[in-house]
Image (cartoon, rainbow, N blue to C red):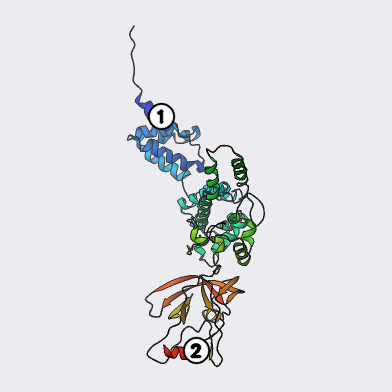
C-alpha cells in the first residue's frame, strides 16, 4: 500500500500570522491595536485583495461580519471596507475614545513613595494616555492646565515641590502634559543613576575578606561588613532612603539645607559624605532647566558654601589715610593719569524684562556663583518673581536676607549679542565693608 504525502496548504500558511490577531468586536478602544496588527501581518504581507478581504472577514465579529456582508462578498470592495471601519471606529475625534483616554489618565493610581519602581510605574501609566493624545493631535488636552494639575497632585510631597519649583517663572508652555511627562522621565533616569552608585569603602571590605582564612581578625571584619548595609537617613533618622530622597530635607528651606551640608561635610554634587565635589565620581548635574551646574538639584540657587581660600586679616591702617566706602555700584577707580587702574571689570549693558529695558553697568565677578541685581534697577524694569530667603556670603562674612528670584535678558549696548540670565537674584541691599586705600601707593603706580 503506497501513501501519498501532501504539502502544506498555501492558504493555511497565509492564515498563520493572522491567527495572533484578536477578533475585532467594534470596540473603538481596541481599533488602533487591531488595525496595526492587521496591516503588518496581513495587508503588507499579502498582495491579493481577495486574500486580504477573506482574512479580514474572519477577523471581524459575527455581528460586524453580518453588517458588512454586502461589501465582503466582492474583493474589489476591500479598500471600501477598510475606509468604513476607519470612519466608524478609528476616528481619533471619536468622543468615546477621548473619554476613555482622559478617564485612564485621571484614574492613575497616586504615587505612594519616591522609590525607583514606584516612580517607573507612575511614569508609564501617565505616558500611555499622553501618547494617545499626541497621536490624535489633541492639543487642547495636552495643554490643559486642569489635567496637569490633577495628575501632578498624585505625586508625593517631595516631587510636588520639585515640579512647582520647575514651573515657577516659566512660560505656560512648560506646564503642559508633554513637559510633565518629560520631567517625570528625567526623575526616573536620575533615580536609576543614583541607584547604581556603589560605596567604594564597602566594596573594598567585601573583596578584601574573600579567600582569607577565618581568623579572629577576619571574623570582626565580617561582622563590620554585615552592619554597613543598615543605614539611616542623617536628617530624619529613618532607614530606606538617603538624604537626596528624604522628604524632611526637601521641605527645609535653603538655609537649613546648607547648615546640614556644612555640618556633615557632604558633597554638594551627590549629597554623600566622605569626599568633596572635586573628588566626586558622580556624573550627575543640576536637573533644573537651563542650569547644568555641578551641584545637586536640591541646592540650586544656593550661594558659595566654602571660600576658595582663607583671607589674611587686613594690616593696621595708619592714621591720616583717606577711606573710600565701596558698594556694589563702586566698581573701578579712574585715576587722572595715563595709567588707569581697574579694580573690577565693568561693562555697560542693556537689561530687559518683558517690554521694559534700561541701560546699566554690569560688574563681572568671576568668583560669584549667582547673578545679582539691585532692587532699584528691578523697580525701574517693573520686574517680579518669587520671594526667597538666601544666605549671602561675601569676603566680609555671611548674612541671611530675603530677596526675589526672577529672570531677565542682558544684551550689549549695540545689540550685537544677548543672553538670558536665569535666575537673577534681586537684592535690596548689598554693601561691602569699608576699605582703606593709600593715595601715595596709587600715585606710585
Which circle, 1 or 2, is nearer the viewer? Answer: 2
Q: Disc 1 to disc 2, how far (Cα)?
A: 96 Å
| Percent coordinates x, y for residue 264 in the rendering | 61, 60
Q: The N terminus lies in which quarter of the figure? A: top left
Nearer-N-terminus badge (1/2): 1
> Tag 1's secondary structure?
helix
- Residue 382, position in %: x, y? 54, 78
Q: Quadrant of the C terminus?
A: bottom left
Residue 422 in percent (x, y) is at 49, 69
Residue pictured at 56% horizontal, 85% vertical: 316
Give the secondary structure at mark 2.
Answer: loop
Residue under the point 34% across and 11% down:
3
**Disc on res. 16:** 1
Residue depicted at 47% across the width and 75% down the height: 365
- Residue 227's place in the image compared with 256, above or below, is above
In terms of image quadrants, where is residue 379?
Answer: bottom right
In terms of image quadrants, where is residue 300?
A: bottom right
* Mark sitting on residue 438: 2
Whether residue 93 is visible to the viewer of this picture, yes or no, is no
In the rendered image, residue 141, in percent from the top left (x then y), is placed at: 52, 56
Nearest to the observer: residue 148 or residue 28: 148
Amino acid at each position: 500500500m503506497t501513501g501519498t504525502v501532501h504539502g502544506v496548504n498555501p492558504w493555511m500558511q497565509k492564515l498563520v500570522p493572522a491567527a495572533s490577531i484578536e477578533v475585532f468586536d467594534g470596540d473603538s478602544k481596541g481599533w488602533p491595536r487591531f488595525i496595526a496588527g492587521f496591516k503588518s501581518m496581513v495587508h503588507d504581507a499579502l498582495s491579493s485583495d481577495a486574500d486580504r478581504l477573506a482574512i479580514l472577514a474572519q477577523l471581524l465579529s459575527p455581528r460586524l461580519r453580518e453588517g458588512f456582508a454586502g461589501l465582503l462578498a466582492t474583493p474589489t470592495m476591500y479598500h471600501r471596507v477598510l475606509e468604513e471601519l476607519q470612519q466608524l471606529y478609528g476616528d481619533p475625534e471619536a468622543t468615546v475614545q477621548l473619554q476613555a483616554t482622559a478617564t485612564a489618565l485621571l484614574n492613575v493610581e497616586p504615587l505612594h513613595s519616591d522609590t525607583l519602581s514606584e516612580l517607573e510605574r507612575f511614569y508609564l501609566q501617565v505616558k500611555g494616555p499622553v501618547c494617545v493624545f499626541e497621536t490624535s493631535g489633541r492639543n487642547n488636552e495636552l495643554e490643559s492646565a486642569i489635567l496637569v494639575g490633577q495628575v501632578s497632585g498624585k505625586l508625593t510631597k517631595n516631587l510636588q515641590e520639585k515640579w512647582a519649583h520647575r514651573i515657577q517663572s516659566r512660560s505656560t508652555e512648560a506646564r503642559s502634559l508633554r513637559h510633565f511627562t518629560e520631567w517625570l522621565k528625567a526623575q526616573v533616569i536620575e533615580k536609576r543613576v543614583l541607584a547604581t552608585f556603589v560605596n567604594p569603602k564597602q566594596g573594598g571590605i567585601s573583596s578584601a575578606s574573600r579567600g582569607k582564612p577565618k581568623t579572629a581578625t577576619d571574623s570582626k571584619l565580617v561582622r563590620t561588613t554585615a552592619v554597613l548595609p543598615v543605614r539611616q537617613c542623617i536628617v530624619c533618622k529613618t532607614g530606606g532612603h538617603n538624604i537626596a530622597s528624604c522628604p524632611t530635607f526637601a521641605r527645609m528651606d535653603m538655609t537649613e539645607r546648607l547648615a546640614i551640608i556644612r555640618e556633615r561635610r557632604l558633597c554638594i554634587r551627590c549629597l554623600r559624605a566622605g569626599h568633596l565635589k572635586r573628588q566626586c565620581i558622580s556624573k550627575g548635574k543640576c536637573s533644573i532647566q537651563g542650569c547644568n551646574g555641578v551641584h545637586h538639584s536640591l541646592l540650586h540657587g544656593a550661594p558659595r558654601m566654602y571660600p576658595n581660600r582663607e583671607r589674611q586679616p587686613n594690616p593696621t591702617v595708619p592714621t591720616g589715610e583717606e577711606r573710600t566706602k565701596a558698594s556694589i555700584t563702586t566698581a573701578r577707580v579712574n585715576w587722572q593719569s595715563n595709567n588707569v587702574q581697574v579694580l573690577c571689570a565693568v561693562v555697560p549693558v542693556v537689561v530687559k524684562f518683558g517690554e521694559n529695558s534700561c541701560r546699566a553697568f554690569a560688574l563681572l565677578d568671576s568668583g560669584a556663583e549667582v547673578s545679582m541685581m539691585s532692587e532699584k534697577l528691578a523697580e525701574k524694569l517693573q520686574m517680579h518673581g518669587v520671594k526667597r530667603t538666601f544666605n549671602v556670603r561675601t569676603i566680609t562674612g555671611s548674612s541671611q536676607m530675603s530677596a526675589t528670584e526672577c529672570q531677565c535678558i542682558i544684551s550689549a549696548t549695540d545689540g550685537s549679542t544677548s543672553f538670558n540670565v536665569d535666575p537673577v537674584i534681586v537684592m535690596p541691599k548689598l554693601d561691602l565693608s569699608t576699605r582703606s586705600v593709600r593715595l601715595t601707593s596709587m600715585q606710585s603706580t
